[in-house]
Amino acid sequence: MGKKILVINPGSTSTKIAVYEDENRLFDASIGHSLEVTSRYQHILEQVDMRYGLIKKTVNGEGYKFSDFDIVMSRGGPFARVES
């Protein structure tokens, strides 16, 4: 059995996610964030709990749990680059 990977791409109006097993994409989704919702937050970092909940709901709805993943990757954010 291959490695299960959760990929997260947070953007200003959506969070895109995908689940892979090795190189094979098993599913992907785009979770939209309306201006009505995002305008409640002064800074994008304040959206972490909201986005986390939506990602978890979407992943669970596809039959996965966070504990199923061997790797979680994300692009963007306020962190320094990390070598892969």
Image (cartoon, helix red, strand yellow):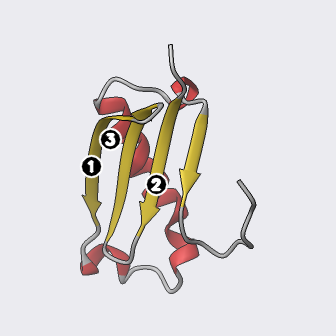
Which numbered disc, 1 or 3, marks the residue closer to the eye?
1
User: To which residue does mark 1 refer?
Assistant: 29
Amino acid at circle 2: Ile
Q: Quadrant of residue 35?
A: bottom left
User: To which residue does mark 2 refer?
Assistant: 8
Question: From what the image shows, is residue 77 above or below residue 5?
Answer: below
Amino acid at circle 1: Ala
User: To which residue does mark 3 refer?
Assistant: 58
**Of helix, strand and loop, which one carries label 3?**
helix
Nearer the observer, 58 or 9: 9
Q: Residue at x 50, y 86 (%)?
A: 42
Q: Residue at x 40, y 26 (%)?
A: 64
Q: Residue at x 26, y 49 (%)?
A: 29
Nearer the observer, 76 or 38: 76
Q: Quadrant of residue 30?
A: bottom left
Question: From what the image shows, is residue 63 above or below residue 48?
Answer: above
Could you give the CA–CA distance between mark 1 and mark 3, rounded to whole angstroms?
A: 8 Å
- Residue 76's label in the rendered image is none
